């Protein structure tokens, strides 16, 4: 049984539903969850908010937060996850925003990915520096990390 199937089984056993808000992963997290047959009783929805406008319109991310911190920040990741939790009938909302590459800057290097996790108990954020192993590897690593965050939240609920 795959790790994703086990995650879905855990959520199913606890009656938990999940939603995702993705930027740099572009739907890879939702795809990973829906690659498992029967996932629809756990995975409620996923939104790809690649642009700042989408983050504001679909998730309620504040323009000031984007202006003050940039899209790749824990502050934006938090607002993405909290906005999704407020809009979806789920117990777990996770967000991903980052710089998959190529490119980046001195202040926001390639491979930096910020994650947000929101549940009724509150929200948390973290930033992981995956380095610059290439766009595909950063996106795959970010997807795997987000799945682990969902698993951790499911275990705690």
Image (tube, rainbow, N blue to C red):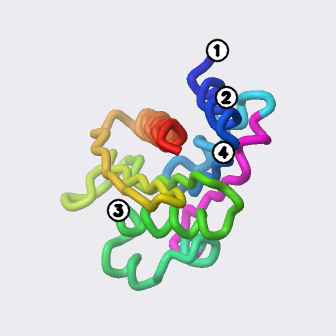
Q: Is residue 93 left or right of residue 75?
A: right
Where's residue 63, x and y in %?
46, 83
Q: Is residue 104 above or below residue 10?
A: below
Q: Is residue 55 left or right of residue 87?
A: left
Mark 3 element type: helix
The one of 86 and 67 positioned closer to us in this rendering: 86
According to the picture, the residue beneath numbered tag 1 turns out to be 1
**Structural distance between the alpha carbons of marks 2 and 3:** 29 Å
Q: Nearer the viewer, mark 1 or mark 2?
A: 2
Q: Are marks 4 and 1 in contact (CB under 8 Å)?
A: no
- The circle on residue 16 is 4
- The circle on residue 9 is 2
Q: Is residue 67 above or below residue 8?
A: below
Q: Is residue 136 visible?
A: no
Q: Are marks 2 and 4 in contact (CB under 8 Å)?
A: no
**Structural distance between the alpha carbons of marks 1 and 2:** 10 Å
**Structural distance between the alpha carbons of marks 1 and 3:** 33 Å
Q: Earlier in the sequence, mark 4 or mark 1?
A: 1
**How many neighbours does mark 3 have within 10 angstroms: few (below 14), some (14-19), or many (20 or more)?**
many
Q: Is residue 106 above or below residue 36?
A: below
Q: Is residue 50 magenta?
A: yes
Q: Earlier in the sequence, mark 2 or mark 3?
A: 2
Q: Nearer the viewer, mark 2 or mark 3?
A: 2
Q: Are marks 1 and 2 in contact (CB under 8 Å)?
A: yes
Residue drawn where x is 43% and y is 33% of the image: 137
- The circle on residue 74 is 3
Residue drawn where x is 70% and y is 45% of the image: 43
Q: Which residues are magenta?
A: 39-53
Residue drawn where x is 47% and y is 42% of the image: 156
**How many neighbours does mark 4 have within 10 angstroms: few (below 14), some (14-19), or many (20 or more)?**
some
The one of 146 and 150 positioned closer to us in this rendering: 150
Mark 4 element type: loop
């Amino acid at each position: 049984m795959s790790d994703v199937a086990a995650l879905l089984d855990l959520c199913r056993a606890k009656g938990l539903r999940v939603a995702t808000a993705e930027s740099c992963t572009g739907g890879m997290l939702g795809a990973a969850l829906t690659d498992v047959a029967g996932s629809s009783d756990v995975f409620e929805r996923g939104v790809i908010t690649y642009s700042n406008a989408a983050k504001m319109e679909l998730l309620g991310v504040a323009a000031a937060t984007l202006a003050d911190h940039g899209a790749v920040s824990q502050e934006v990741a938090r607002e993405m996850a909290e906005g999704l939790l407020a809009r979806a009938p789920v117990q777990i909302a996770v967000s991903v925003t980052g710089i998959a590459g190529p490119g980046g800057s001195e202040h926001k290097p390639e491979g930096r990915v910020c994650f947000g996790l929101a549940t009724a108990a509150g929200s948390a954020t973290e930033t992981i520096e995956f380095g610059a192993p290439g766009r595909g590897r950063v996106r795959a690593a970010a997807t795997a990390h987000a799945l682990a965050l969902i698993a951790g939240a499911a275990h705690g609920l």
